[in-house]
Amino acid sequence: MTLPSTAPPASTTPAGDPTALLFPGQGSQRVGMGEHLMAAHAIARATMEEADEALGFPLTRLCLEGPEAELTRTELCQPAILAVSVATWRALGPATGIEPRWVAGHSLGEYTALVVAGALAFRDAVRLVRLRGRLMQSAVPDGVGTMAAVVGLDDARVAELCAAAAEDEIVSPANFNGAGQVVVAGHRGAVARVMAAAKAAGGRAIALAVSAPFHCELMAPVAAGLARALAEIELRAPAVPVVTNVDAAVSGDPARIRELLVAQVTAPVRWAESMQLLRSLGCRRVVEVGPGQVLAKIVQRMRLGMASATLEEVAEARA
């Protein structure tokens, strides 16, 4: 079953309200996500069924029932978050009256943004991100790499600490999230050295429960397989401008977007710069679409003068 395009009509986009839609990445998953949405909206159920069919796997049951250990596996977590996010937009978006002027997604969420912008077919997207997750998981043996969040130090200082702590290993900033938070990724020992150095410099460091060190050079083996898969699917010019992770810029050319999706696996997510760009372009509100509200909260903490909310909150306010 193929559902209608999720993109707003191209003709309405330039005149749309100064709102950007934000789509979360890995880490926002939870067992039970999408349950109330599917109970209340046939389009949400149909979207999840479409994902099940595309994958040949009961993704919906995994989202609703778990187990959590399976849902957190990278190759299953990524299509699960994407599917629930698209289902949320299809179910709640029309009633809110939102005509987004921009879309952006954090890491995995960039694929969701491309679906909602009409650049990438939903079925292709869920298959792609399952492959992406599988490639990421297999790129580094279990226990070799990890990630940590460093809080309270500026971006440049964290980059300096990574350079000093690397020694003969790999460690680098993976997510520049804004509001004083930088996630680092690399070899386990090197990440531990960065954490110790960050604490000594007056910051805080929090180990993250992740299955692989994303967005660093340890993910280099992913690039070739992902590039081959992307070459085989249709990628159209988005109907809504997409702010991309790698360059924190508005991208509309399909060939360039393909390149950026491949580069994204080893490059840091420049989320803070992406949000600053949105503000400079005239964005006055960001609305997070999908499980959780981590991106909306980051924007609040950044104090950019943009209102932030989840799509559920906007829908409830209009009910």
Image (cartoon, rainbow, N blue to C red):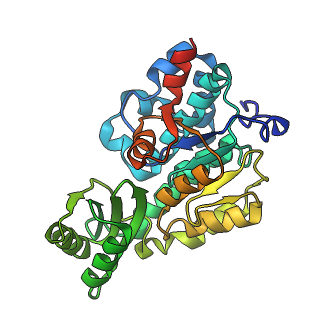
Between 268 and 48, the one lying in front of the other is 268
The residue at the point 16 percent across, 66 percent down is 199
The residue at the point 42 percent across, 29 percent down is 33
Q: Is residue 106 above or below residue 159?
A: above
The residue at the point 54 percent across, 65 percent down is 264
How many marks do you count on the picture? Answer: 0
Q: Is residue 127 above or below residue 284?
A: below
Residue farthest along the top direction in this orientation: 319
The residue at the point 56 percent across, 71 percent down is 223
- Which part of the image, by quadrant, shows the N terminus? top right
Residue farthest along the front direction in this orientation: 305
Q: Position of residue 109 (x, y in %)?
A: 54, 48
- The quadrant in which residue 19 appears is top right
Query: Horizontally, is 15 left or right of 193 in the view?
Result: right
Query: Horizontally, is 273 left or right of 157 in the view?
Result: right
Q: Is residue 263 above or below residue 178?
A: below
The reply to whether residue 58 is in sight is no
- The quadrant in which residue 11 appears is top right
Between 252 and 274, the one lying in front of the other is 274
Q: Position of residue 140 (x, y in %)?
A: 37, 70
Q: Position of residue 20 (x, y in %)?
A: 61, 41
Q: Is residue 188 above or below residue 33?
A: below
Q: Position of residue 14 (x, y in %)?
A: 79, 41
Between 201 and 316, the one lying in front of the other is 201
